[in-house]
């Protein structure tokens, strides 16, 4: 393994060249120091490209399979750990970001750990959480490492089936320090579980934000920029809206449940809202029916006038498809993901850009994006702990271990949380956007086991409001009442 | 009778037209399975004039391991259907023909076990399978499919058996045949077509079952519906792979039904004879 | 069973008792298997339905008496889901039986390729609901979907099909009928074809043809088949889940939130207690409907038998 900090200084010179599309990063009050530092370290590492043969251009044009194959063939690790053996079974949901990335890294991993067999037990995304939790709750030993949304960590952790990894991390402090420096604090903190003494249970190499997606060519033609306030957003949605030509003002996923829940909270947060008055004993009172809550629903109501018709019951794949075919050109709060920059998915791959969502007017409002992303943990019921840790640590490595890992992940369609990897792949607008947005995020859920259930119920109420089934007062009141019932059951008011 | 034959020819044409229109959406799935992804994601539908691709079929067999998956489906669904038929035939005979005072009650009891929503019972089944070490085995799925297939099979078979002519059995009894001989040598051949129909529908309902297959398998014994569901990325449905998988899933069924066509017609026919 | 013939084949006396013993012997394996496999899930569900038992936080699980039930009864969405389920069942089953019968008549003819048609028409039942449901969603996509593409080709205005509260339930009904009408048709068709040639010939001699042949001769004769299909379709319509889950998942808003989808949301959100309570209530509803249905059926069957014997 080799460090790269010595190369950082010498590559600083190139940075203006390589990050041409990146907006200047001003330090703002709400950006914490660690994130700012992490951001600067990206810029420092931007130019690093150990393999001259893999030019950026080639990287973008070739198909994912070709690039991943080329990386694996060219890969020659400095060190080989033949003494680690066993079989690691990976439990994850199938998809570009979690399935394809792991499959892309596996050949590299096996060159470093030739005696560890990797078994892929990919699962459908539907009901993934239920199958995983069911297996965790019976201490199932059939898998070793799982890959799950950070929002699910507190809930799955409560089943008692996760291994804490602080001790494992302490065995290789150099690696740990690089990880903590490279992954923004706002991301890595999500894998330390407050309800379990703040211990670390997961590592992450996947970052995701719910933020503004827009077609730069369309905005340029209309003479607009991504709006910074919701008033501007509504105005531009109105301006862009022309159903006769098959172009709609905006789009969002309002399917009842979790999807609408994330959209509501996405807008709610930019209006200065929060879920609870205080997140400590004596607090935990839901405050959806507040200025921010009312403003959020009113903004949503206005936007729906100019919305793509699919919005009323859309999931994120429908939103992405609308962007892919060109009928959607502006989504103020969408999950989107890197697939929108994939030339094999849409012909607009080069012109879909990303920015922070607009801000509201209520107290505490600001341009904030929701932080998503997935991480891996070790199943305490698993039998192959050594192999499991070897895989987890390798897969979640950054350039400190080897840049090839990040290259493989990006080529396969992943979206790293590692600053070093993001920094080298600024050519893909989403990775640039991801990087830009990381310091301005709020968690997409509160870090409590009840969070997903609350997200789903606010989504149900929000979807009923959007579709005219409930009025604004009833919807917000129901959010508060139902959340309070869940928190009561969780013993938060005792 | 000239008028009638014209009428009849018009009706023939109509029959073909209706079936073709009815199946158009399925044809669309088949078409999607050979289209390049870019065309699938375009705003204008494409019907003809594109270069067909086999990439989705290759993907389905490599990445989604359809080779193994089809074998798993055939084993679990095939064996469970066989067990269902072996158990259901005597049971249906008992509730329909043997003069059980409470035959209707039993028939209803048996049927009502099928009424529970799957999500409610899937976790208990998962726990049961885990406690006896059957998770991720064919056996676990076979057991569940027997449990869910049996009520349906008993109910349909009962309908067929109720309407079989009784004279043959009477004759058998007069010849001194025992119950078992009557059941298996006289009734079984008469009811064979009905049994074929029941078996086909039992097979189909298990063939498309998703929830239990998801919970009770990990990767070794995954069945087709679960593998198909894996083509649905949260952010991006792999339409090509999904359609290719659906086509592959459908073909064996069509072949079987085509072969059993005569039996189906005759089978259902016997059920309806008064 | 009024028409049950007596028989005299066996010498040893209480024949009825012997028959019943054999009958129970034949029935026993099935009952044992079903009881063995359903007793634990059922008891477990009843147990769960009196608890708060979050999948995401087992530590706070405890008994709460009837609260899950009272919570359900005080939820508008619960009553709405029952209303939608019953409405759904009545509309969908009626359409499927009527159109299914017409389709059966249409396919009831001797011609070249008839067996091919009869094979192909059953494909909607066989094809994977996951793939077909998504494809239908794709077809009904409001901007680029095939449905609106055809409408605009005809110069008509398109609809938001699945993403409007006005049309979503109707669109789902359409797809459900597309899938299940062939099932009904095929079974009715077999019934029609089984009518003995003598009866058909007699009808022809009596100049009973066309519509009156089907209403006066066919319908009464295939009554048992109709009843079996009807019962299966009623039960499955109340439990209707697959297509709803894939195409609308109860939305937009709660406009297609039928009971099974409503119950599923508790599963999805990890409220196992509410899920079990709602599932049991659904079980009660299905049993109630089936009980009423079968009661009427048997009463009329007995009446018919009595009429036959005269």
Image: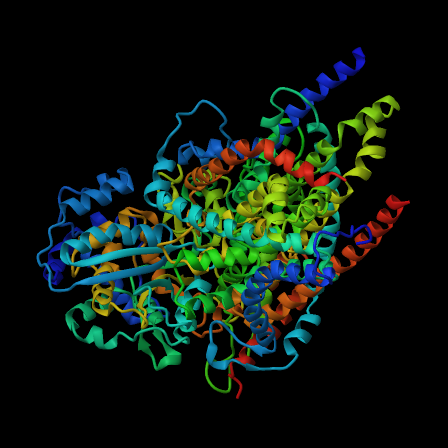
Horizontally, is A360 left or right of B136 in the view?
right
Q: Check the image and tell me how it is coloured.
A: rainbow
Q: Residue at x 31, y 47 (%)?
A: A428
Can residue B29 be seen from the camera position used here?
A: yes
> Which residue of the protein is positioned furthest toward the bottom in this rendering?
A494
Q: Where residue C60 appears, x then y in whole percent?
A: 50, 81
Q: Nearer the viewer, residue A449 or B3?
A: B3
> Which residue of the protein is positioned furthest toward the right in this rendering?
C310
Count of labels shown? 0
Q: Where residue A456 appears, x then y in whole percent?
A: 54, 64
Horizontally, is C110 left or right of B72 in the view?
right
Tell me the quarter of the picture where residue B105 sits.
Answer: bottom right
> Which residue of the protein is positioned furthest toward the top in this rendering?
B2
Q: Nearer the viewer, residue C287 or C143?
A: C287
Q: Residue at x 71, y 57 (%)?
A: C11
Q: Where residue A134 appears, x then y in whole percent?
A: 44, 67
Q: Quadrant of the C terminus of chain B?
A: top right
**Whether residue C178 is situated above or below residue A91 in the rendered picture:** above
Q: Nearer the viewer, residue C290 or A404?
A: C290
Q: Where residue A354 appears, x then y in whole percent?
A: 39, 51
Q: Residue at x 60, y 82 (%)?
A: C64
Can residue C236 be seen from the camera position used here?
A: no
**Whether residue B244 is situated above or below residue A35 in the rendered picture:** above
Q: Quadrant of the N terminus of chain B?
A: top right
């Amino acid at each position: 393994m080799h460090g790269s900090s010595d190369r950082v200084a010498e590559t600083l010179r190139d940075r203006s060249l390589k990050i041409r599309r990146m907006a200047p990063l001003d330090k703002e009050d709400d950006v914490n120091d660690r994130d700012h530092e992490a951001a600067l370290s990206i810029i420092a590492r931007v130019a690093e490209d150990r393999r001259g043969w893999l030019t950026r251009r080639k990287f973008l044009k070739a198909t994912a399979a070709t690039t991943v194959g080329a990386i694996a063939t060219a890969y020659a690790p400095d060190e080989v750990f033949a003494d680690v053996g066993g079989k690691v079974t990976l439990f994850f949901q199938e998809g570009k970001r979690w399935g394809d990335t792991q499959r892309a890294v596996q050949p590299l991993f096996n060159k470093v750990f030739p005696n560890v067999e990797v078994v892929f037990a990919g699962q459908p995304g539907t009901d993934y959480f239920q199958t995983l939790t069911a297996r965790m709750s019976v201490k199932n030993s059939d898998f070793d490492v799982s890959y799950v949304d950070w929002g699910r960590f507190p809930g799955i952790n409560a089943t008692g089936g996760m291994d804490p990894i602080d001790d494992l991390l302490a065995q290789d402090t150099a690696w740990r320090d690089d990880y903590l420096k490279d992954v923004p604090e706002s991301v890595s903190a999500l894998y330390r579980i407050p309800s379990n003494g703040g211990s670390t249970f997961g590592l992450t190499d996947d970052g995701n934000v719910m933020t503004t997606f827009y077609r730069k060519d369309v905005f340029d033609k209309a003479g607009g920029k991504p709006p910074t306030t919701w008033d501007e957003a509504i105005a531009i949605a109105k301006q862009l809206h022309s159903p006769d030509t098959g172009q709609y003002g905006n789009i969002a996923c309002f399917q009842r449940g979790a999807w609408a829940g994330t959209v509501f909270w996405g807008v709610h947060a930019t209006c200065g809202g929060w879920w609870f008055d205080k997140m400590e004993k004596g607090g935990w009172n839901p405050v959806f029916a507040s200025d921010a809550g009312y403003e959020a629903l009113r903004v949503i109501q206005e936007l729906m006038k100019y919305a793509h018709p699919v919005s009323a019951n859309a999931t994120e794949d429908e939103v992405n498809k609308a962007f892919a075919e060109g009928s959607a050109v502006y989504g103020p709060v969408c999950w989107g993901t890197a697939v929108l920059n994939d030339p094999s998915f849409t012909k607009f791959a080069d012109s879909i850009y990303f920015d922070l969502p607009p801000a509201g007017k209520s107290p505490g409002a600001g341009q904030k994006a929701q932080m998503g992303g997935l991480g891996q943990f070790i199943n305490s019921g698993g039998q192959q702990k050594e192999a499991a840790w070897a895989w987890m640590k390798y897969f979640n490595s950054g350039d400190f271990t080897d840049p090839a890992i990040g290259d493989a992940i990006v080529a396969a369609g992943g979206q790293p949380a590692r600053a070093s990897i993001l920094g080298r792949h600024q050519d893909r607008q989403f990775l640039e956007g991801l990087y830009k947005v990381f310091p301005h995020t709020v968690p997409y859920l509160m870090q409590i086991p009840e969070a997903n259930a609350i997200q789903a119920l606010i989504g149900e109420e929000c979807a009923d409001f959007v579709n005219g089934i409930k009025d604004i007062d009833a919807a917000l009141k129901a959010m508060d009442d139902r959340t309070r019932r869940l928190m009561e059951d969780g013993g938060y008011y005792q | 009778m000239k008028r009638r034959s014209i009428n009849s020819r018009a009706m023939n044409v109509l029959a073909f037209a209706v079936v073709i229109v009815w199946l158009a959406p399925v044809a669309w799935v088949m078409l999607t399975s050979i289209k390049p992804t870019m065309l699938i994601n375009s705003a204008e539908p494409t019907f003809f004039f594109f270069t067909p691709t086999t990439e989705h079929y290759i993907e389905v067999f490599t990445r989604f391991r359809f080779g193994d998956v089809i074998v798993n489906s055939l084993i679990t669904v095939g064996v469970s259907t066989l067990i269902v038929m072996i158990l259901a035939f005597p049971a249906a005979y008992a509730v329909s023909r043997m003069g059980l005072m409470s035959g209707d009650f039993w028939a209803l009891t048996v049927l009502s076990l099928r009424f529970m929503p799957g999500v409610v019972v899937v976790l208990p089944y998962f726990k049961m399978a885990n406690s006896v070490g059957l998770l991720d085995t064919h056996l676990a799925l076979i057991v569940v499919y027997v449990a869910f297939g049996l009520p349906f099979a008993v109910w349909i078979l009962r309908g067929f058996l109720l309407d079989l002519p009784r004279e043959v059995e009477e004759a058998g009894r007069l010849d001194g045949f025992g119950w078992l001989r009557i059941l298996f040598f006289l009734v079984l051949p008469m009811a064979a077509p009905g049994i074929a129909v029941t078996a086909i529908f039992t097979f189909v309902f298990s063939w498309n079952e998703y929830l239990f297959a998801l919970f009770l398998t990990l990767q070794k014994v995954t069945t087709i519906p679960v593998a198909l569901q894996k083509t649905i990325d949260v952010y991006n449905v792999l339409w090509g792979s999904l359609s290719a998988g659906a086509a592959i899933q459908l073909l064996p069924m069509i072949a079987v039904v085509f072969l059993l066509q005569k039996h189906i017609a005759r089978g259902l026919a016997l059920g309806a004879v008064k | 069973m009024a028409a049950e013939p007596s028989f005299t084949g066996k010498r040893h006396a209480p024949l009825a008792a012997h028959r019943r013993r054999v009958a129970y012997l034949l029935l026993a394996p099935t009952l044992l298997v079903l009881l063995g496999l359903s007793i634990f899930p059922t008891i477990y569900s009843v147990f769960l339905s009196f608890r708060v038992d979050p999948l995401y936080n087992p530590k706070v699980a405890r008994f709460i008496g009837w609260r899950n039930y009272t919570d359900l009864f005080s939820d508008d969405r619960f009553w709405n889901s029952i209303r939608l389920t019953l409405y759904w069942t009545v509309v969908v089953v009626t359409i499927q039986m009527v159109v299914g019968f017409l389709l059966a008549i249409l396919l009831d003819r001797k011609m070249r390729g008839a067996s091919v048609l009869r094979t192909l028409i059953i494909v909607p039942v066989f094809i994977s609901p996951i793939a077909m449901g998504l494809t239908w969603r794709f077809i009904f996509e409001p901007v680029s979907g095939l449905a609106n593409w055809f409408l605009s080709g005809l110069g008509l205005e398109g609809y938001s099909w699945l993403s409007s509260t006005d049309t979503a339930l109707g669109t789902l009904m359409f797809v459900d009928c597309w899938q299940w009408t062939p099932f009904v048709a095929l079974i009715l068709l077999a019934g029609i074809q089984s009518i003995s040639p003598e009866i058909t010939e007699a009808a022809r001699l009596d100049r009973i043809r066309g519509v009156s042949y089907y209403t006066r001769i066919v319908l009464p004769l295939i009554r048992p088949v109709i009843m079996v299909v009807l019962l299966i379709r009623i039960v499955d319509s109340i439990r209707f889940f697959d297509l709803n889950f894939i195409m609308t998942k109860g939305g937009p808003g709660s406009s297609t939130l039928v009971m099974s989808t409503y119950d599923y949301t508790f599963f999805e959100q990890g409220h196992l207690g509410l899920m079990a309570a709602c599932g049991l209530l659904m079980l009660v509803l299905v049993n109630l409907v089936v009980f009423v249905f079968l009661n009427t059926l048997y009463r009329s069957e007995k009446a018919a038998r009595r009429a036959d014997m005269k």
